[in-house]
Amino acid sequence: MAPPARTGGDDVTALTARFERVEWLSPRAIGIYGIFLGALAFWFALPPVMTRSPVLPVALGILAACAGIWSFSRDEHRVGGGAIAAGILGIVLGLLALRSSTGNLKDVVVWSALFAAMLRYATPLVFAAIGGLYCERSGVVNIALEGMLLSGAFFGLWAAIWAHGWAGNAAWLVGLAGAALAGMAFGAIHAVWAIHFKVDQIISGTAINFLSLGITGYLFIDKYGDTGTPGDITNYGIPDIHIGFISRIPFFGAIFGQLNLMIWLSFLLVIGTWIFVFRTPYGLRMRAVGEHPRAADTVGIDVIRVRYIAVISSGAIAAMGGCYLSLGFVHSFNEGMTQGIGFIGLASLVFGKWRPFPTFAATLLFGFSSALADRLDAYGDQWSTLFQALPYLMTLIAVAGVVGRSIAPAASGRPYVKQ
Amino acid sequence: MSDDELAEEEFEAAPPAGEVPSPQQHFASRFRGVTGALGPLATVVLAFFVSGIAIVAIGKNPLRVYKAFWDGTGLNFFIHFGSHSVRIPFSTTHVWFWWDTASISAQNLQQTLLTTTPIILTALALALPFRAGLFNIGGQGQYWVGSILTVWVGESFIGLNGPVHIALCLLVGTLGGAGWAGIAGFLKAQWGVHEVISTIMLNWIAIWTISYLLGQGGPLQGSQPAIPVSNQIADAAKLPIFWGPKLLQGLSIGIFIALAMLVVYWLLINRSTLGYEIRAVGFNPDAARYGGMSVARNYFLAMAIAGAFAGLAGAIDMLGWRYSLGQLDVENQAGQIGFIGLAAALLGRNTALGVGAASLLFGALLTGTSGRQLDQSIFRPDLAGDLTTIIQGLVVLFVGLNLLGLAAWWRRRRGRVATT
């Protein structure tokens, strides 16, 4: 028998085979439908459909919950639980949306603006999560991401203000460098403590979070406590990239036409990280160190050195996300302004099972809920305060419910003792 | 114990190569008695020394600043002896006493002890799960949940009998904290969700939910419109104040509840089956499971009891001196009692006595740096607040390092180099 044509044929058969293997009516699949139904229940209450009767969201939500219960009772606890949660959330959010006026809803839910806001909110999460990815893939737990983000936010801003005098409107470049240096400094502390002194990595991470909160707040009060950060930062903040031909496309133009440089960089970072981690020998070595340091050591990889590099670069990457937050997004600094973003980034990493693209998708989900909460707060009334809790609630549900028991790199959290 | 023995013990206690060092191997059982206090003491001295650099960096004299902190703590109350006539609390009898209980430093000391009370309890909220190998970083959220429930019960049921009302408030606050932490415990036990992530998320969910409840038009906003603060709790529900002025935050009997909880914690960990199981699970979950213990159950119970401590902290604060809760109290990150408690627990090596001493230290530090006590001309109080956070971070950083062990390790290493 002649071998099948090499070009394309393999891929197509592989793809169809993959589709054929999917069990479309397995409990797991039903649970996933349930999650989608729950999301639909909310979606129908929003523009452009904007149903004004409670029947549709409630019915869809109940359907979602039923699918969830069915799948839950067939031992798909996570997906089933996720579907039940999605159904309930769909009903609650849908009914809340029904209560607000159509005009208000149209103000809040402009899908293109919402997606653009989603990308803005997701970007610091992407940097935090990818920073964490390097650290954890090499076998060091990093809950100091929050502190690294915060240090990047302050020191980036500070460096840019300092450089403004001689660098003019390009001061943001100095800011980014300053942020990266600050993040590397904290990363270095974490590295020495975790790798060299073999301190419990959660404790050293917590210590860095406190230190970063204290040091940035201390310097902020000392320098800008009375006046706040200068108002002209917008002039030399990280610039937006205006792409003419995209901005003329109807829907996508409003989303991608005018995005901050760091958002584009975050896309590149995700792709670059995937290539580095899964397609280069260096990435392979890093993963080996995170999975089985003894084996890596046996074949001549310097475990300690790989971990040091990974942890310190993790700090630099996370800090650049913080720098975007202060210098590219809100153009000011406040004490403790990161508000748990580093931890949401960490949760995205867990949700994405320590892989770049799923992690990116998770950050988009959390970014979307932040964007929704923010726009609701801006246009809504009293109960919209409650929506500020939405990103955190989504994170909790996502980490608890929908993901399978995600498997961390095997040696994550364990100091390596060379024999 | 001589230095060499110390070094030996250090090496024996080191985990086998490549194994996870359990929290126990880092803390608690390594040093006992007087030597056990030396490491934390060295930690504190080093932390204050390093944060002194931050004071020098903005052109102040650290010794003068620390002296100002010290004066504000009221701990100097104990070093001024004299002959005074003192009224016994809750009576009209006066007796002779060697300390003046009505002096300024006595009032400062009341503030210090008032701050120490919730720190002890939130420290226990970290210490207990730590023995089970869990890191409960959500003490702050559990504290707020306990607080809001206490305020809600305290401002309702007006006319209820005093002790009954107080007991009800404390109970509801405690259960609220337990439930909030129990969510994280359940998620950990059922699906292995990492407790650091879940408790941090629960912190923020609590903060924004309470912010909604107390905000403009929120269900628990008080009778005054345009002020996002809850109603005051009923007078009958306020804890009795036994030392100091009733209207100016005197010391309530809450401190005794906190001290009692230290004893409860000691009994629970060292003298109960549950405590034994919790320690076993923390030491080695697989071995505990093999020995017939339910790891999931112990994870859940450790978290829930921890949350109960933190919720009780919130309840005592509400009934003891806050009396009402405002939106700004919750949103403002300055009052991070839960996180201070975390540092206190780590510094106290998760032992009852250590937690008590470390909580007093942090309670004094918080009081000494508060805007009410600190002389503005010597050091800005808001700067001092951040300095407290730096000290807190340094303490956690160095306490993990185990300074004494490190010193022994250095000596040993030097000796090895010399012999080869």
Image (tube, coloured by chain):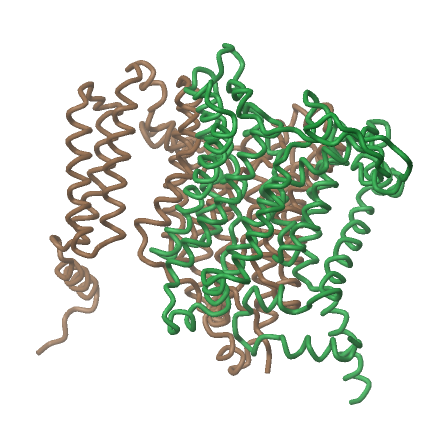
Chain colours: A brown, B green
From the viewer's perspective, tell me whether residue A212 is left or right of residue B62: left
Compare residues A388 and B374 and report the one nearer the observer: B374
- The answer to whether one can see residue A331 in this image is no
The residue drawn where x is 20% and y is 69% is: A6
From this view, report whether residue B322 is shown above or below residue B76.
Answer: above
Percent x, y of residue B35: 75, 66
Percent x, y of residue A123: 47, 41
The C terminus of chain B: image quadrant: bottom right
From the viewer's perspective, tell me whether residue B345 is left or right of residue A119: right
- The answer to whether one can see residue A144 in this image is yes
From this view, report whether residue A40 is shown above or below residue B302.
Answer: above
Compare residues B29 and A329 and report the one nearer the observer: B29
From the viewer's perspective, tell me whether residue A111 is left or right of residue A341: left
Please identify the quarter of the rendering in which residue B378 is found: top right
Q: Residue furthest left?
A: A1
The residue drawn where x is 41% and y is 42% is: B179
The N terminus of chain B: image quadrant: bottom right
Q: Residue furthest front?
A: B93
Q: Residue furthest top?
A: B225
Percent x, y of residue A311: 58, 60
From this view, report whether residue A18 is shown above or below residue A253.
Answer: below
Q: Residue furthest right?
A: B82
- Tally the numbered discs: 0
The residue drawn where x is 15% and y is 60% is: A16
The residue drawn where x is 80% and y is 77% is: B2
Compare residues B213 and A400 and report the one nearer the observer: B213
Percent x, y of residue A162: 74, 36
From the viewer's perspective, tell me whether residue A8 is left or right of residue B346: left
